[in-house]
Amino acid sequence: MNARYAVFGNPVVHSRSPQIHQMFAEQEGTVIDYRRILADNNADAFQAATHIFFHSGGHGANVTLPFKEYACQQAHERSERAVAAGAANTLIRLSGGRVFADNTDGAGLVRDITENLATSLTGKRILLVGAGGAARGVIHPLLACRPAEFSVYNRSHDKAEALAQRFGIRSLHLAELPRSNGFDVVINATSGSLNGELPALPANVFRNCQLAYDLVYADQATVFMLFAAANGAARIADGLGMLVCQAAESYKLWRGFTPDAAPVMEALRREGRP
Ligand code: NDP
């Protein structure tokens, strides 16, 4: 029987994980069984669904919204980065029916920025925009790259301040941004671009900006990417590379094989959004 994997979510029908992991398996020269599993949107239903999966031979799983926090809480063991994020996107079956939770989202972002986009984060001034689950998940791996400065700004300042307290970084009010000298790397971790909405950002934050990165991915440049490019960002990118790289990190954890993200990103770009 082929090794079994799954992605849990609600909704999950749009998840591209099955397609991505099948391409990784082809690279490895193997065949895997990777399915989407829809669970009801509550902690008990998620726990029951993952229990059935792992106790019926499942090897590993991805977890997407809205279950990432439950995945971290309910696992028997968890990585430091999952604890820091308070959320997990990867589950691994251990011996004796135990489950290990990890979070590869931040590692995927870092890999996309530093390898695919060839932009070092060490010694850089980083501005993270947004303070939701995605923002919280990427801070620990970004800090591990030893940036010179790390600031977070969010529409609701209390959430940015909570992250600042938790991670020992600086939170900025909107009124402080025009006084900044710009940032080397600006990362949009808001969901604004999904609805064509631009977070309130003064143009000067993109002065001297080497890379403006939007976690949202789309067929065309997002409103954030267009605004950043128009105001001085030397390079813009969307989050497709992060999506593929976080999946590659999960695959490596499950199977010890490191997939090449580039051809998978190219295939997804060719296809466009489903
Ligand atoms: P959450 O719902 O937890 O947080 C949403 C964040 O976006 C909050 O900070 C919210 O601000 C902010 N926001 C939403 N709309 C606007 C707006 N119009 N102007 C300013 N701020 C806004 O979402 P997540 O953190 O889980 O996800 C954020 C995005 O990241 C999603 O779009 C998701 O698709 C993407 N993502 C991409 C991944 C990838 O692999 N490429 C992986 C994970 C996530 P406030 O607090 O004020 O409401």
Image (cartoon, rainbow, N blue to C red):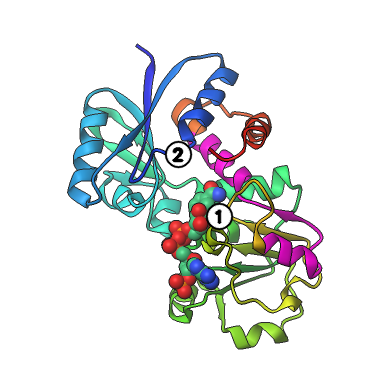
Amino acid type at circle 2 is Ser
**Measured from the top left, where is residue 19 in percent x and y?**
51, 29
Relative vertical location of residue 79 with respect to residue 260 in this rendering, above or below: below
Which residues fall within the magenta stretch? 224-250
C-beta proximity under 8 Å, tags 1 and 2: no
Looking at the figure, which quarter contains the N terminus? Answer: top left
In the rendered image, residue 51, in percent from the top left (x then y), is placed at 21, 35
**11 drawn magenta:** no
Q: Mark 2 falls on what kind of element?
A: loop
| Image quadrant where residue 170 sits | bottom right
Q: Residue 210 location, x and y as percent?
A: 78, 61
Q: Is residue 68 left or right of residue 144?
A: left
Figure check: 202 above or below 139 = below
Residue type highlighted by circle 1: Pro
Q: Is residue 247 magenta?
A: yes
Residue under the point 26% across and 43% down = 76
The answer to whether 192 appears left or right of 121 in the picture is left
Q: Is residue 55 visible?
A: yes
Q: Which residue is mark 2?
A: 15
Rendered image: mark on residue 155: none
